[in-house]
Image (spheres, rainbow, N blue to C red):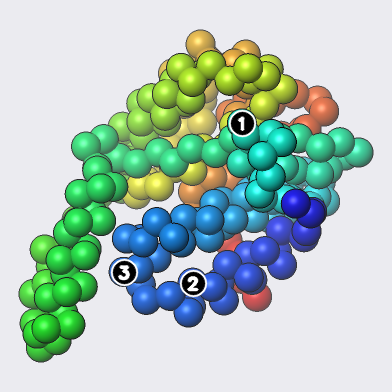
Amino acid sequence: MYFRDPVDILMECREEQASIPATNIITDPEHRPCQEKWCAATFGSGYSKYVSLCRVAVNDSLDRKDADFFLEARGGVFPFQTTECMREGRKRDEEYRKLGEVKRGIEVEPERVAEFLSTVLTPYRPVLGSEKGPEWIETAIARKVKKQYAVSEGLNLLVYANFEAKGMDVRVIRERAKAHRDKFASIWIITDRHICTLFSNELIGEVTGWEVNVFRR
């Protein structure tokens, strides 16, 4: 395990993803470490931009099994657990199965690619995410709290909100999740485009509201 600039890791993730067929990125568990690296690096990129310069390290050791990655910043090292939050009712295993079927269908009958893809595409509904997102995020945090990590007081939590939303109010999310405020040292949220702090402390700092966190190079 070693610490690196989060932008360098994001570049590495981009190269890795470019070499993997689109369906395999989602359906093949072998590529999950790439997704975990992306979460750590995306968070680190936003943290560097809005809080303090930092480095991150994905946990590939057995010494600290409760941490997925570590943030090195402000003279300290902060362990993080990550969790993905999806819209209610979305089932990853079912998506894997359907996408696998679509992949096989396209290989056999490539002329029917549009028809096959239409069976797995879902409508873009950002309003639903904006309305229900706070509830989904609170549920994801509650699931982590139930794990009862032995050193959770020193463990930070990163929630990847992987659903369509527009204009989610951080104050509403904080109100829904306030019962979990002291269960982790800090709680953060990232989306594909934004970063924010839900609850934090002086040592690690905070992002006061939703800030744009789009990586470009």
Name the residue that disc number 1 marks: 66
Q: Is residue 127 visible?
A: no
Q: Position of residue 4 (x, y in %)?
A: 78, 58
Q: Is residue 214 visible?
A: yes
Name the residue that disc number 2 marks: 17
Mark 1 Cα shell of 10 Å, populated few (<14), some (14-19), many (≥20): some
Mark earlier in primary sequence (3, 2): 2
**Above or below, 62 relative to 152:** below
Question: In front: 151, or 121?
Answer: 151
Amino acid bearing label 2? Gln
Q: CA distance from mark 3 to mark 1?
A: 29 Å
Q: CA distance from mark 1 to mark 2?
A: 26 Å
Q: Quadrant of the C terminus?
A: bottom right
**Mark nearer the viewer, 1 or 2:** 1
Q: Verify CB contact (< 8 Å) between mark 3 and mark 2.
A: no
Question: In front: 172, or 120?
Answer: 120
What residue is rendered at 71% in x and 58% in y? 6
Name the residue that disc number 3 marks: 23
Q: Secondary structure at mark 2?
A: helix
Q: Secondary structure at mark 3?
A: helix
What residue is rendered at 31% in x and 32% in y? 132
Mark 2 Cα shell of 10 Å, populated few (<14), some (14-19), many (≥20): some
What residue is rendered at 58% in x and 61% in y? 214
Mark earlier in primary sequence (3, 1): 3
Amino acid bearing label 3? Thr
Q: Residue furthest top?
A: 179
**Above or below, 35 relative to 143:** below
In this rendering, position of residue 187 left or right of residue 31: right
In this rendering, position of residue 8 left or right of residue 74: left
Amino acid bearing label 1? Asp
Q: Secondary structure at mark 1?
A: loop
Q: Position of residue 216 (x, y in %)?
A: 61, 71
